[in-house]
Amino acid sequence: MTPDRDAILTALESVVDPELRRPVTELDMVRDVVVGEGGRVDVTIALTVAGCPLRSSFEDQVQRFVGSVEGVTSVGLHFDVMSPDEKAALTSRLRGGRPEKTIALEPGTRVLAIASGKGGVGKSTLAANLAAALAARGERVGVLDADVYGHSIPHMLGVQQRPVVVDTMIVPPVRGDMKLMSIGFFLDDNSPVMWRGPMLHRALEQFLSDVYWGELDTLVVDMPPGTGDVAISLGQLLPRAEVVIVTTPQPAAQQVAVRAAAMAEKVGMRIVGVVENMSYLVGTGQEIFGAGGGERLAEEIGAPLLGRIPLDPALREAADAGTPVLEAAPGAEATVALEALAERVQGTRPGMIRKPLTLLS
Ligand code: ADP
């Protein structure tokens, strides 16, 4: 029997662009479907860019979905590239009527800025791993690496591919259920970054307006350490952003973290709480960097202590290898602490009922 053309088109509705996360049929990417002799079907898909690194995902999906239509004996997949007009039509559809140069986040997306008073306390490590832990709990997560001086998140999450630019829209690379955008994608390796305030503000603005974030539950933002221009810009661009402050147990770290918290409040961000990192050494429980910094900071700024993450070689090794620790070392002490942290952070989402309501009679 000859396969039914409509059944093939229906099967193609299940083929999803891995970065845009929408069916190829909805994105007008199906250029041609030819049903030939003996059940042979040839499909042509128009990609946004010629060298699309995710071709194999399309190949797998088309084989799977079209190949299982009744009467199909073999499937051929061919690629073409969208014309500039098609790309412009695609981006305006993805923008869904939203004017250009306006913030591309849905109203329901929670923005969680991960901040610290100084560098080296593990802020980027926690941002990357908290994002992965939230994704593992079923959230659709975006990660914006705004640490212009460090931009280590792509390395920690093992994302090498660069964003794809389609017309006026930047499509972020994906890692599983996470989308990632980093200022590092646009810089030459190892060239020094000397950003002035207005340049930083424009770069952040572009990351929030021109990047196709799609539907996200949470956007985790890795902030540069300290109390600089990026925090001010983010406060202006995203007045409903919330902040998690990372510190180590040392008094010196805790004191500078107080300033970061004060700064966040000044620009109108809500402080969700404090995370103490490198609290104790796994196995021994030894408090290498002292004790109590997280608790004291939480007390001082009037926010909860959301978690204490141990110093765990598994976490450092996973970050160096470009894998979230919950994938690289399930069950490791740092993994367990990060999973508990993600659960705690989820519970602080505005609109969540944290305590059972008391019934008034
Ligand atoms: P920051 O963003 O605050 O400058 P990083 O996240 O880059 O700090 O962390 C600095 C280094 O410490 C990295 O090599 C990271 O892998 C390591 N690190 C951070 N937190 C931990 C931890 N809890 N256990 C082990 N190593 C950690």
Image: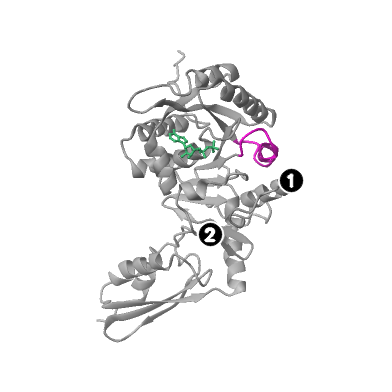
**Part of the protein shown in magenta:** 224-241
Q: Nearer the viewer, residue 218 or 12?
A: 218
Colour scheme of this structure image? Answer: one colour
Residue corresponding to mark 1: 196
Could you tell me residue 227's position as x and y percent? 67, 33
Q: Residue at the spot x=67%, y=56% of the render?
A: 100
Q: Is residue 115 above or below residue 132?
A: above
Residue 8 falls inside the magenta stretch: no
Question: Residue 119, how many percent across, how many down?
Answer: 58, 35
In the image, residue 310 lies at what x, y percent?
41, 29
Amino acid at dot 1: Arg
Q: Which residue is mark 2?
A: 162
> Residue 308: which quarter of the image?
top left
Name the secondary structure under disc 2: loop
Q: Is residue 89 left or right of residue 276?
A: right
Quadrant of image for the C terminus: top left
Q: Tag on residue 206?
A: none
Q: As rendered, which of 69 and 105 lies closer to the eye?
A: 105
Q: Residue at x 55, y 73 (%)?
A: 82
Residue 64 placement (x, y as % from top left): 31, 67
The quarter of the displayed image where residue 65 is located:
bottom left
